[in-house]
């Protein structure tokens, strides 16, 4: 009985050994054993090696897009900061000008009119006319005085994107812009306004009184001064156009005669007087500015050619 029991239980270890052997050698039955490993790795949630670089590349545009959004936000924040600084400077200087509001209205604004003629009389036609007059005069005075600071804030926003030599030239440009603007304002106030007001006072029949609306007079003065200030920026405009290659001194010299005729026509249109001397008083400074613009354009193009060589 014992032998029968031993014979009955003996095959069990052999069967286990055969099963283990079949499990060990079952891998040789699969012609692509590595494929199963990859599938298993995928099923486990682990990324395959071949897909990893592609996913990394897909992540790059997302990062660059985020950086681009941050750059745009940074530029908007920079513009906002510059505008706030310019606005605060304008408000502070305007508030300081309001302290001398009577002087600005009586002496600065109405002074050219009273010095030109005694027949021109200002009158107010609306209830809030003088309040509007004072606000316009004070705000315009604050803008003229704060103009260099506003131009400097614009330059500070543009400067980080320029080269070092362009930054140095830009600092000089801010000074040049301010001086040109103030020179134009001075020319309009001390030359243009007296000439035109004298003509207005002497023209027409004495049977009609020249009672001028104060609102129209303020608009005329502000428009004349701003126009003169912008006209005197012609050399700087020539500098910028020459810097980017859109203007050359040869072009300006070739059309010099045409430009002189156009400037004299503009002087004749702007100046109401038919007197040739009066027209020349307005036209000659503009012709001089054109000649200065030619010299500036020649200097800029000379430097550009030296850099190209």
Image (cartoon, rainbow, N blue to C red):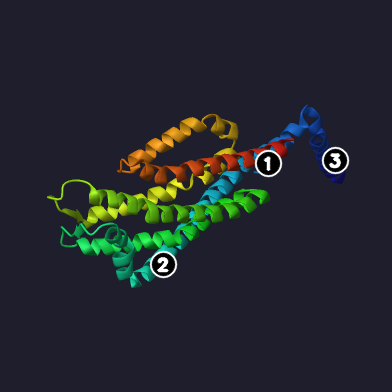
- Displayed quadrant of residue 86: bottom left
- Residue 127 is at least partly visible in this image: yes
Q: Which residue is mark 1?
A: 303
Position of 309 with respect to 119 (left or right) is right
**Distance between the Cα atoms at labels 3 and 2?**
116 Å
From the viewer's side, name the closer residue of 24 and 62: 62
Question: Which of 157/247 is in front?
Answer: 247
| Sequence-earlier tag: 1 or 2 | 2
Q: Is residue 171 left or right of residue 182?
A: right
Residue furthest bottom in the image? 99
Residue 146 occupies quadrant: bottom left
Q: Are marks 3 and 1 in contact (CB under 8 Å)?
A: no
Q: At numbered mark 2, what does the secondary structure look like: helix, strand or loop?
A: helix
**Residue on which the image places disc 3:** 7
Please name whichever residue, 286 or 87, is drawn nearer the observer in this view of the structure.
286
Left/right placement of residue 289 relative to residue 2 reads left
Q: Does residue 40 appear in the picture of this structure?
A: no
Q: Position of residue 266 (x, y in %)?
A: 38, 38
Disc 3 versus disc 1: distance between alpha carbons? Answer: 110 Å
Decide: few, some or many residues near mark 3? Use Cα within 10 Å; few <14, some 14-19, many ≥20.
few
- Looking at the image, the residue that sits furthest to the top is 31
Mark 1 crowd level (few <14, some 14–19, many ≥20, 10 Å Cα): few
Q: Position of residue 74 (x, y in %)?
A: 53, 54
Mark sitting on residue 93: 2
User: In what element is the residue under mark 3?
Assistant: helix
Q: Earlier in the sequence, mark 3 or mark 2?
A: 3
Classify mark 2: residues with Cα within 10 Å, few (<14), some (14-19) or many (20+): some
């Amino acid at each position: 009985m014992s032998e029968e029991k031993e014979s009955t239980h003996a095959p069990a270890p052999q069967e286990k050994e055969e099963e283990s052997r079949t499990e060990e050698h079952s891998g040789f039955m699969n012609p692509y054993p590595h494929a199963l490993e990859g599938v298993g790795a995928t099923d486990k949630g682990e990324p395959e090696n071949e897909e990893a670089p592609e996913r990394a590349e897909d992540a790059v545009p997302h990062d660059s897009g985020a950086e681009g959004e941050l750059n745009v936000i940074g530029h908007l924040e920079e513009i906002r900061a510059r505008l706030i600084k310019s606005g605060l400077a304008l408000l502070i200087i305007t508030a300081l000008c309001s302290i001398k509001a009577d002087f600005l209205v009586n002496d600065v604004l109405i002074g050219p009119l009273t010095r030109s003629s005694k027949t021109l009389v200002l009158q107010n036609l609306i209830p809030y006319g003088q309040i509007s007059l004072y606000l316009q005069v004070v705000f315009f005075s604050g803008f003229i005085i704060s103009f260099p600071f506003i131009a400097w804030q614009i330059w500070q926003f543009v400067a980080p994107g320029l080269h070092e030599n362009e930054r140095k030239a830009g600092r000089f440009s801010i000074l040049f812009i301010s001086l040109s603007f103030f020179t134009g304002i001075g020319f309009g106030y001390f030359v243009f306004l007296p000439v035109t007001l004298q003509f207005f006072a002497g023209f027409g029949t004495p049977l009609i009184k020249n009672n001028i609306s104060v609102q129209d007079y303020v608009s005329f003065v502000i428009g004349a001064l701003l126009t003169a200030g912008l006209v005197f920026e012609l050399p700087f405009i020539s500098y910028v156009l020459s810097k980017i290659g859109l203007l050359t001194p040869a072009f300006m010299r070739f059309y010099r005669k045409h430009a002189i005729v156009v400037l004299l026509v503009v002087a004749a249109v702007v100046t109401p007087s038919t007197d040739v001397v009066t027209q020349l008083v307005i036209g000659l400074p503009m012709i001089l500015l054109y000649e200065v613009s030619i010299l500036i354009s020649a200097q800029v193009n000379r430097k550009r050619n030296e850099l190209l060589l």
